[in-house]
Image (spheres, grey):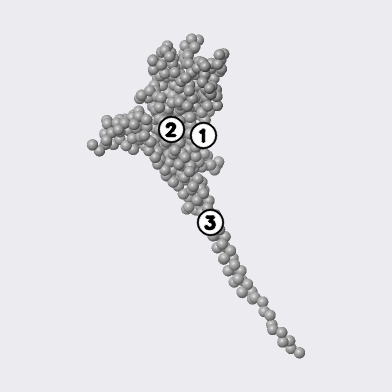
Amino acid sequence: MRSTEPKIRGFSLVELLIAMALGLIVLAATTQLFKNGMDATRLVTQSSEMQQNARATLNLIAKDVSMAGSGLPSGGLSLPAGAGSTPSFFAVDPTQAWLANNGYPGKFMYGIVPGAGNGIEIGGPATIAATGTASDAITVVYADYAFPLNQYTTAIPAANPLGDKVTFTPPVPAPAGFPAIQSPTGIQVGDLILFTNNLGSAVGEVTGIAPVAGGSTDISFANGDPLKINQTGAASGNIRSIIGGGTTTGTRLWAVTYFIEVPAAATSQPPRLMRQVNGQKPVPVADNIINLKVTYDVCNGANGPNCSGITNPLLAPFSPSQINKVNVQVMGQTLNSYGNKSRSTVLTTSVSTRSLSFKDRYN
């Protein structure tokens, strides 16, 4: 007897293959869409971080530049010169020099020392791979009035006629909260101290600090300091040259240098902007800063109409003492690139220096 139940058929092999293929296509599309979304999220996040880094970098440089020359003698400070002298340096810590051309021009410490094309650390590449160009450096020098060193009594002991040791005594009675020499914000080895009296001005690099009886502190300025500022045998421009000039005041100086460090490829670290102060070790300001460009306006009435956007005011007829505006450009890049989706940003600012002089170039 023949069964009357309906015949139940399954999917054929062809139908299964087609269904699997369509499923894989949908799954692949979904996965790619998810990956694109994650990449976009990372890129947006990194772009935001890049802009924040570049903006913070620009703000920090602008703050230092706005103080350039504060507390320095007009036209710059003479460094050790004449017979027995050697060049003095910036961008040096106790272990190494960070820039190739790091001597003060003409043995003068100006408020701003330009570094056209000199902004990549020694040992790094000639140019930054991401831009194919060299970076600039800039050194800014100004007085630190936050620490009241000028309120200490300054005396060069008779036993140190070369000026390689100076005694600082706090006021008596000292005001409440008056900071000590060796307080957390006080003087450190490697700091620069500017001395001024009626014979002129001189600067020294701190090489030692030792408390003495009565609350005073002896600060040493021995030869052989990393910055080669202490040169007791130089004919002029050293601390010895102003001994006997009456009441002497001391002020801490900040000599701040910005440059780009390009780590070795093996470290997989990106280029980063460094800030080096006095004779201390440099510290990173921001990662993935791939270029620093600095130009200067030196319009002073004598340089003619072509006096803005100067890349190297160390060349005649210009002088660093004539700089009245600094134009800073910082370029940042995202940490990772996804195919052709790497992003970069350029931020610029212009800062008038404290010695700004007005010249109408249009009359």
Q: Inspect the image, locate mark 2, and give the three-letter code of the amino acid beneath it.
A: Asp
Give the answer, above or below, for where 293 lies relative to 77. below
Residue 89 spot, x, y in % from top left? 45, 26
Q: Inspect the image, locate mark 1, and give the three-letter code of the amino acid beneath it.
A: Val
At horizontal 48% and vertical 38% (from top left) the residue drawn is: 273
At horizontal 39% and vertical 15% (from top left) the residue drawn is: 198
**Disc 1 target residue:** 283
Answer with the quarter of the image where residue 246 lies.
top left
Which one is earlier in the sequence, the residue at label 1 or at label 2? 2
Given residues 316 and 188, the one toward you in this image is 188
Q: Mark 2 falls on what kind of element?
A: helix
Which one is earlier in the sequence, the residue at label 1 or at label 3? 3
Residue 19 spot, x, y in % from top left? 60, 71
Given residues 127 and 327, the one toward you in this image is 327
**Disc 3 target residue:** 37
Q: Inspect the image, locate mark 3, and give the three-letter code of the amino acid beneath it.
A: Gly
At horizontal 45% and vertical 30% (from top left) the residue drawn is: 256
Question: Which quadrant of the figure contains the N terminus?
Answer: bottom right
Q: CA distance from mark 1 to mark 3?
A: 36 Å
**Disc 2 target residue:** 64
Q: Are marks 1 and 3 in contact (CB under 8 Å)?
A: no
Mark 3 or 2: the one toward you: 2
Q: CA distance from mark 1 to mark 2?
A: 15 Å
Q: Are marks 1 and 2 in contact (CB under 8 Å)?
A: no
Q: Mark 3 falls on what kind of element?
A: helix
Report crowding for label 3: few under 14, some 14 to 19, many 20 or more residues within 10 A (C-alpha). few
Residue 337 spot, x, y in % from top left? 50, 50
